[in-house]
Image: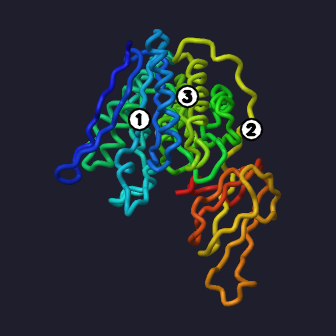
């Protein structure tokens, strides 16, 4: 048995309070490949936590059989801060109530200063370059001086994940089909995670400009490649993905156990676990540029009445929903149509039906890049 459990304190923001991260480690520290898995950074997105619960049961059995080949770090509750944000019976886990914003935005820029830190240490040895870069990123993280519970959370999670070969950040959407995000350069080698999970969309983007958790660990490598050019071999040494386990209400053992089995087979196929994962399931989608995915937004406040179901294929101009003004003097004139701006798959819908101006009410995955999606942040807040 190799499993160990560590508790990392996040300090106290008020007297008598202290939260912690529980870290489950499998295999030998420093063994390769290393996989890092965390659930529910948005702490009101529960499906990932249940999937990790089932995954840990599989990993515990694998550990007993000596089937852990690499190193696996699992954080089943990535956000104990948000997990405790229950206000009058309602869970608010997407934003920090102290004013820290979206828990999955504004993560540290690990490329900042990286080029200067490694420039004189790089060589023609690709493996040695990977070690140099990982060490430099680790040093940068260790030099950070977090002074709040939230900043400590970000530093500690970054410390756990920064040197992983694979980073799996498990989320969910409001109402949605299974989908994944990753960098396009990783699609060829890691599309099997989409196949194993039955993803209906795979959204590809180098940099969404949102400073999300997954991009924190993949972007330094692609940026370093651009900066170094062909002078030294720099691989894409960290595959990082956000997995969206359908919608917030999709919390069922049957789903979660199948999702965990898919993650387990993915880890087998990439050498972290022993055993035969079998044939890769047939993909249910191809990789799609994130700029081809439209976030349909409410033009004003009102009540959303949807006219399309999840999974529907729509055409540009099709009616997606009607926005109802409950205070309209004439009920027959209270509805404003909201139409699709692209052909594609209806991937997600808003869980709250009372919306404000600018709220995202649906995602439509198309194939053609959309002009209004270029520049700026590609992810909703």
Q: Which residue is mark 2?
A: 285
- The tag on residue 313 is none
Which corner quadrant holds the N terminus? top left
165, above or below 327, in the image: above
In this picture the colour scheme is rainbow
Tell me where residue 46 appears, x and y as whole percent: 49, 45
Instruction: Name which of mark 2 and mark 3 comes first in the sequence.
Output: 3
83, above or below 327, in the image: above
Q: Nearer the viewer, residue 248 or 132?
A: 248
Q: CA distance from mark 1 to mark 3?
A: 15 Å
Q: Which residue is mark 3?
A: 236
Q: Secondary structure at mark 2?
A: loop
Q: Secondary structure at mark 1?
A: helix
Q: CA distance from mark 2 to mark 1?
A: 36 Å
Asked whether disc 2 touches disc 1, contact meaning CB atoms under 8 Å apart, the reply is: no
- The tag on residue 114 is 1
């Amino acid at each position: 048995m190799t499993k160990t459990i560590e508790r990392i304190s996040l300090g106290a923001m008020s007297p008598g309070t202290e939260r912690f991260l529980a870290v489950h480690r499998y295999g030998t520290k420093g063994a390769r490949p290393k996989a890092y898995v965390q659930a529910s950074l948005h702490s009101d997105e529960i499906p990932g936590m249940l999937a990790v619960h089932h995954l840990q049961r599989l990993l515990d059995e694998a550990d007993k059989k000596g089937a852990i080949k690499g190193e696996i770090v699992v954080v089943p509750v990535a956000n104990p801060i948000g997990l405790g944000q229950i206000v009058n019976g309602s869970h608010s886990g997407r934003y920090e109530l102290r004013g820290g914003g979206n828990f999955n935005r504004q993560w540290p820029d690990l490329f900042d200063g990286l080029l200067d830190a490694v420039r004189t240490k790089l060589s023609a040895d690709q493996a040695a370059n990977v070690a140099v870069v990982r060490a430099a990123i680790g040093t940068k993280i260790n030099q950070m001086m977090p002074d709040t519970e939230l900043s400590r959370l970000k530093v500690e999670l970054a410390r756990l994940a920064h040197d992983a070969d694979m980073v799996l950040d498990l989320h969910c959407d409001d109402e949605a089909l299974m989908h994944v995000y990753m960098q396009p350069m990783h699609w060829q080698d890691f599309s099997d995670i989409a196949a194993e999970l039955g993803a209906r969309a795979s959204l590809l983007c180098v940099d969404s400009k949102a400073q999300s958790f997954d991009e924190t660990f993949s972007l330094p490598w692609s940026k370093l490649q651009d900066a170094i050019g062909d002078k030294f071999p720099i691989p894409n040494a960290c595959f990082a993905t956000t997995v969206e386990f359908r919608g917030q209400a999709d919390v069922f053992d049957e789903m979660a156990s199948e999702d965990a089995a898919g993650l387990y087979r993915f880890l087998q196929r990439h050498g972290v676990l022993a055993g035969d994962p079998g044939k890769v399931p047939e993909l249910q989608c191809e990789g799609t540029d994130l700029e081809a995915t439209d976030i349909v937004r409410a033009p004003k406040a009102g009540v959303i009445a949807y006219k399309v179901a999840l999974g529907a294929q729509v055409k540009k101009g099709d009616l997606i929903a009607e926005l109802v003004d409950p205070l309209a003097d004439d009920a027959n004139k209270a509805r404003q149509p909201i139409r699709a701006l692209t052909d594609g798959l209806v991937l997600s819908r808003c869980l709250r039906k009372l919306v404000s101006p600018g709220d995202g009410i649906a995602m439509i995955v198309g194939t053609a890049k959309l002009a209004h999606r270029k520049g700026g942040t590609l992810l909703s807040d």
